[in-house]
């Protein structure tokens, strides 16, 4: 087992309740997570799932009701852990009458240092070189996000916590953010803990993900493993199509996806990965000719929707 010293984040039995008895809302319930150093880790969930509460606990902005959290083996809020963490938290604010440059200088000096060369490099790396001397009050949401990212990197942290980092960014900016996150992990050896609703981006950049809902951990693991183990789609071009339908309905009645056109010789099936060879063999044995076969893995977005929908059904039952 990897020791805690190799874990950038360790969350143990974390719970957070807001409000008094009778009106209490439990935002996080007995959450356990481990994020290994060097990973890009996606922390996912619907609105109100407990993501922001968990991040605020990690940043020592609020205290948990129960449980504990550690950053690099040290309790959150300790001086040592704070020095090793940078964060872009949703709703981060700056002095609107000051320039981007001056805001970063103030933050740097507040931390007891002043590194103008590093500030200049960060401003350039987040794409604000042309706006560095302009008042932040005139910045768009996307520009403020870029500035927030520069601020999070001021102390050259080992752990970067990003809460909705693509908010306000256009498609080009989102692509730049994707590249930036990869660089931070793979080139600069940082751990990235990422909360985002942009699941396509998460799928492309994250090594592992956790999905929570109503404060409860639903699924966790490597992205590739989670998606490979789940139902995906297989498209088959077959003849005669009526016979293929009969075979599939007889053996796998829930697998057949309704066709877009009745005269199509393509069939679409929703299957677990281990079912695909069985279907192909059964069709061939039944005299069905297969001309083309295309397998489509479930996307992270599809997986997320299915997992959270199942959780809702269980809670409503």
Image (cartoon, helix red, strand yellow):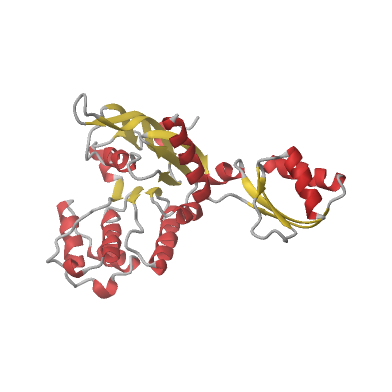
- Determine the residue located farthest toward the left in the rendered image: 97
Q: Residue 250: horizontal and vertical position, in percent?
A: 76, 39
Which of 229 and 303 lies nearest the eye of the viewer? 303
Residue visible at 38% across and 51% down?
A: 196
**In this rendering, is residue 145 above or below 197?**
below
Residue visible at 71% across and 40% down?
A: 252
Q: Residue 155: horizontal and vertical position, in percent?
A: 27, 53
Which of 44 and 25 lies nearest the eye of the viewer? 25
Q: Quadrant of the C terminus?
A: top left
Which of the 4 image quarters holds residue 82?
top left
Q: Residue 195: horizontal and vertical position, in percent?
A: 37, 48
Q: Is residue 7 visible?
A: no
**In this rendering, is residue 281 above or below 32?**
below
- Determine the residue located farthest toward the top in the rendered image: 21
Which of 242 and 58 lies nearest the eye of the viewer? 242
Residue visible at 17% across and 62% down?
A: 103
Which of 136 and 132 lies nearest the eye of the viewer? 136
**In this rendering, is residue 135 above or below 270?**
below
């Amino acid at each position: 087992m990897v020791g805690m010293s190799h874990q950038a984040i360790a969350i143990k039995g974390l719970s957070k309740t807001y409000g008094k008895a009778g009106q209490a809302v439990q935002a996080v319930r007995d959450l356990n997570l481990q994020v290994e150093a060097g990973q890009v880790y996606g922390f996912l969930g619907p609105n109100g799932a407990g993501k922001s509460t968990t991040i605020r606990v990690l940043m020592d902005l609020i205290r948990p009701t129960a449980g504990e959290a550690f950053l690099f083996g040290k309790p959150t809020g300790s001086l040592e852990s704070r020095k090793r963490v940078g964060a872009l938290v949703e709703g981060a604010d700056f002095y609107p009458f000051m320039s981007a440059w001056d805001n970063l200088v103030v933050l740097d000096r507040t931390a007891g240092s002043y590194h103008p060369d590093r500030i200049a490099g960060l401003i350039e790396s987040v794409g604000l070189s042309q706006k560095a001397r302009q008042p932040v009050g005139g910045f768009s949401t996307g520009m403020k996000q870029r500035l927030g990212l520069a601020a999070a990197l001021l102390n050259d942290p080992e752990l970067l916590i990003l809460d909705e980092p693509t908010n306000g960014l256009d498609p080009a900016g989102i692509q730049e953010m994707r590249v930036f996150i990869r660089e931070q992990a793979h080139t600069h050896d940082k751990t990235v803990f990422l909360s985002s609703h942009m699941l396509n981006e998460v799928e492309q950049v994250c090594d592992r993900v956790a999905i929570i809902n109503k404060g409860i951990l639903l699924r966790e693991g490597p992205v590739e493993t989670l998606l490979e183990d789940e139902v995906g789609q297989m498209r088959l071009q077959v003849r005669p199509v009526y016979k293929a339908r009969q075979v599939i309905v007889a053996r796998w009645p829930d697998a057949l996806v309704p066709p877009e056109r009745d005269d199509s010789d393509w069939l679409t099936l929703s299957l677990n990965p281990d079912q695909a060879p069985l279907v192909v063999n059964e069709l061939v044995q039944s005299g069905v000719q297969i001309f083309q076969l295309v397998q489509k893995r479930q996307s992270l977005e599809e997986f997320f929707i299915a997992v959270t929908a199942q959780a809702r059904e269980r809670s409503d039952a």
